[in-house]
Amino acid sequence: MNMPDLIAPILEQKKTKIKRYPCYVNRASGLGYAVPMLDGCLRRGVYERTHWAEKEPVTPELQLIFDEGNNQEQAILKDFLAAGVQLIEQQQAFEWKQYQISGHVDGKVLVDDDPDGVSNMAVPVEIKSMSPNIFNRVHTFEDFKKFTWTRSYMCQIMLYMLMSDIDQGIFILKNKSNGMLRQINVELDYELAEACIQAAEKINQHIQESTLPDRIDDRTKCKDCPFKHVCLPGIDFGAPIQIADDPDFERKVKQYIEGKDAAKANDKLWDVIKEMAKATAKDGELNLVVGGFRISGKTDTKGSFRTKIEEVE
């Protein structure tokens, strides 16, 4: 009996959702990748607007993760509604013409801002779903600095607070694995907010003058940039990065890194991880992010698959 492949049609359908859109402003959701204070690259910020048509498209697998994040966000909004928590201005669009910044906030919650409760302020709320390993490591606003993509969240909520003319914000985080929620209250960081505005101003100036910022010095960061083929043509960065949402794989990697088992058992666990990595590799090479870990691998001249695990910081 020839069993049908039920996954392939889904991946094909996801390909139809992968599109590039013109980008004529600094999007709040992506500006954090360009802020030097957040270890970002201004050059990438310029390319986002000048070379959007050449941006490296995401994979169908990554699109699945994006869609799951959107589904998780909608689930939280439904939970808020069922619990009687009212979020106003959901998906409200913002535009800050002075700095050519645009964005949309997930919602706002009304909070009493005086002892008599006479007036309310609308506090921006951002909802983010995360793999268990990331969720377990983010407990404060400062913890968002641990990962490249969570650093971009920091800039995003700073801009939403500035555009709302308010000095408070809220993150709602969700563990994708078990549904646990965490609230992180945020106060306006004036230094960070200023750094985000300055990044936007510099990007605008480069675009106006048809110039480019200097490249960053750390080429290891360039490997994951969707404009690396534009900025550094001809350089082989190896296998494209894959992002896996695989709790079992992640659990094994974390267990091995922490070395909870006896040496012999840990060696066996490493063998299992290597086989899982090899099975995930494409054309004998692997560049995979699972939770808070990057797993790289390559088949050597003798046919052995060499695997390396690094913690993503």
Image (cartoon, grey):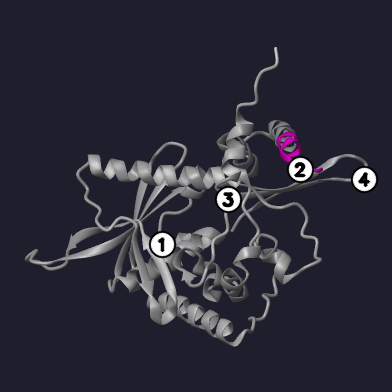
Which numbered circle lies on residue 141?
1
Left or right: where does residue 313 sit relative to residue 27?
Answer: right
Marks 1 and 3 sit apart, C-alpha to C-alpha, by 31 Å
Specify whether residue 291 is in view.
yes
Q: Quadrant of the N terminus?
A: top right
Magenta region: which residues? Answer: 275-283
Residue 297 relative to residue 262: left or right = right
Confirm or deny contact between disc 3 and disc 2 (CB under 8 A): no
Q: Measure the alpha-carbon separation of dots 3 and 2.
A: 21 Å
Q: Amino acid at mark 2?
A: Lys
Query: What's the residue at 46%, 46% (across, down)?
Result: 69
Q: x%, y% of residue 242?
A: 66, 48
Q: Quadrant of residue 123?
A: bottom left
Q: Which residue is mark 4?
A: 301
| Image x and y of residue 279, in percent | 74, 35
Q: Amino acid at mark 4?
A: Thr
Vertical placement of residue 102 versus 289, above or below: below
Label 2 Cα neighbours within 10 Å, binned few <14 / some 14-19 / many ≥20: few
Residue 33 placement: quadrant = bottom right
Q: Nearer the viewer, mark 4 or mark 2?
A: 2
Q: Residue placed at 52% from the left, 81% from the top?
A: 204
Q: Which mark is residue 18?
A: 3
Q: Is residue 147 visible?
A: no
Residue 35 percent across, percent down from the top left: 53, 73
Q: Is residue 148 left or right of residue 78?
A: right
Residue identified by numbered label 2: 282
For the residues labelled 1 and 2, the Cα–Cα distance comes to: 36 Å
| Disc 4: CA contacts within 10 A as few (<14), some (14-19) or many (>=20) | few
Q: Residue at x 55, y 37 (%)?
A: 247
Query: Which residue is more in the foreground, 221 or 9?
Result: 9
